[in-house]
Image: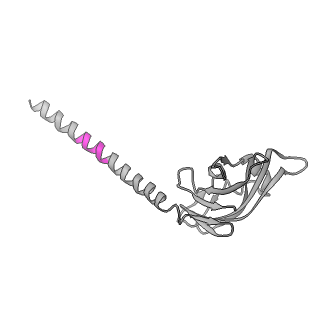
Amino acid sequence: MRKTTTLALIATGLVALGCGAGSTGEGSSSKSDGGTKGDDKPKSAKIGQPARDGKFEFTVKSSKCGVAKVGTSMIGDKAQGQFCLITVNVKNIGKEAQTLDGSSQKALAADGTEYSSDTEAGLYANKEASTFFEEINPGNQVTGVFVFDIPKNVKLTKLELHDSMFSGGVTVSLT
């Protein structure tokens, strides 16, 4: 009887710890997701306006589509359709270093079709290949080009920029 009671108490304690850990994680996640979803409207901008996501403040400087090739005549990358070159300034507004991941950035067409950035073409489009792959320390900023390879008949309408692959993102209108 005593063994059964002890086992029951241990099992109850483990279940309580498991539930507590799960609800804490869900609570944190819900607040984070809820905050992101609730902030969707304020988390949008236009070209030239700063927009924040997590530890980064993004300012889209320009957008140029219809580019067939990036790089030099000796080395580069040719578009399957057309390249859209998006020049962006990224400032670390956090309190610790953060690495900007080009593959976390997305471009969208008017019909909602989502395009991922072409990180290889991005290496050729940026004079310094490491622009978007180095850590950015707090208060520092970099300016570089995100490259998207999209069909020739498509026009991008907005970007979804992220401080990491897990962040809620911020929307920047290109129209």
Is 105 positioned to the left or the right of 124 in the image?
left
Viewer-side residue, 59 vs 40: 40
In magenta, the rendered stretch is: 13-20
Magenta stretch holds residue 15: yes
Q: Quadrant of residue 91?
A: bottom right
Q: Is residue 66 visible?
A: yes
Is 97 positioned to the left or the right of 119 in the image?
left
Viewer-side residue, 54 vs 141: 54
Viewer-side residue, 73 vs 140: 73
Magenta stretch holds residue 63: no
Residue at x 80% of width, y 51% of height:
124
- What percent of the width, then of the height, locates residue 28? 39, 54
Residue at x 25% of width, y 44% of height:
16
Residue at x 69% of width, y 49% of height:
117
From the viewer's perspective, is residue 36 above or below residue 76?
Answer: below
From the viewer's perspective, is residue 11 above or below residue 103?
Answer: above
- What percent of the width, then of the height, locates residue 129? 75, 53
- What percent of the width, then of the height, locates residue 34? 43, 57
Colour scheme of the picture: one colour
Q: Quadrant of residue 51?
A: bottom right
Position of the C terminus by quadrant: bottom right
Residue at x 61% of width, y 57% of height:
161
Viewer-side residue, 33 vs 174: 174
Q: Is residue 91 visible?
A: no
Position of the N terminus by quadrant: top left
- The majority secondary structure of the magenta stretch comes to helix
Is 152 positioned to the left or the right of 25 in the image?
right
